[in-house]
Image: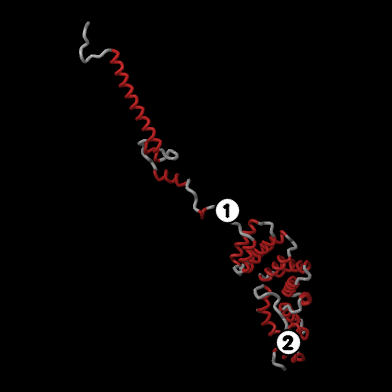
Amino acid sequence: MKQVESGQGSPQGLSLGKLLVLFCLALVGAIGIGLGVTTLTENKGPSGTAETMMASGEDVPNRAGALAVAELVEPPEPNSLDLSRERPVTYAEAESVFMTGSYEKAVGKFVAYVAGHPENAWAYYMLGLSNWRAGHPVEAEAALLQALDLNPNHGRSLINLVRVRLDTGDCAEALEPATKAAHLQPQSVDAQRVLGRVFHNLGRRNEAIEAYGRVLSLRDTDLWALNNLGLLLIEAGRFSEAIPPLARPDRQPPFRPGGQAGREARGRPHRVSLNQLCRCKKTALSEKTAFGRFLGNGK
């Protein structure tokens, strides 16, 4: 038999060697592909943005734009949240601000409150009152009219609508709500008093005297009614009749010092009273002793 030369293998040995080499190459290639996929997966951004393009070797045309997209998904700042999520204003909160005398702030509170309670007539009344005290008569009238649209017989809205219109000089327009308020609330000092004021401003003297007389029948120490009744009687030439309401020592302001009627009574009416008495003293000499006692000189 022929001996096999060294360096030459059998066909079977050669085939097994080739297969082993091919298997190793295939194994190395598979490992390389797996590592490449893993690297790409780790580098990929949330939506295939700048990070993905960098991993694939592509140029990033606008990195700032990519970052802006990412910023859009960030949560909004607390002060940019929808205002509807804020705690709603309560009536008690708005009223407490009004009672402190911060009328401008009270306007804001009641505006917020009526936005959530559009059917609340009293809330619109308080909005009107806040606007009036803050020096906004147009807005005050609008709010009071809204209250009356919801409740046509709302007495406080009628009375304060009269006051707002008197303050703006719209006396003719004040007559209707004043008459209605006095009719709806015949026992209300406020309602009868504002009716007397309207009649007086319209020059309807006798009707004003009657209205102030009704006020005094309900509260005989009402300072505003006493002063204006005295003035009306002087204007009518009824000087002797003017002395009793002007000379009463127990005249009292109709409300607490912070109230509207209280402010009206503390100011002009006091000064007018002294002027009224002096005018009466000059024209009704027979009443000098009564005037002297009131003025404190004992004569």
Quadrant location, the N terminus = top left
Q: Mark 2 points at which residue?
A: 280
Figure check: 273 above or below 72: below
Q: Name the image quarter holding residue 145.
A: bottom right
- Image spot of residue 60 (x, y percent): 37, 40
Disc ID at residue 244: none
Looking at this view, name the residue that lies furthest to the front. Answer: 1
Q: How many labels does the image show?
A: 2
Q: Which amino acid does label 2 sit on?
A: Cys
Measured in 3D between alpha carbons, the distance from the residue under mark 2 to the one under mark 1, in whole angstroms, is 66 Å
Q: Which amino acid does label 1 sit on?
A: Arg
Q: Mark 1 points at which residue?
A: 85
Q: Dot 2: what SS? A: helix
Instruction: Judge the density around disc 2: few (<14), some (14-19), many (≥20) Cα neighbours within 10 Å.
Output: many
The answer to whether 273 appears left or right of 53 in the picture is right
The answer to whether 61 appears left or right of 291 in the picture is left
Q: Name the image quarter holding residue 280.
A: bottom right
Instruction: Judge the density around disc 1: few (<14), some (14-19), many (≥20) Cα neighbours within 10 Å.
Output: few
- Image spot of residue 10 (x, y percent): 27, 12
Mark 2 or mark 1, whichever is nearer to me:
1
State the residue at coordinates (38%, 31%): 34
State the residue at coordinates (71%, 84%): 276
Closer to the camera in the image, 87 or 246:
87
Quadrant location, the C terminus = bottom right
- Image spot of residue 128 (x, y percent): 66, 64
Lower position in the chain sequence, tag 2 or tag 1:
1
Q: Dot 1: what SS? A: helix
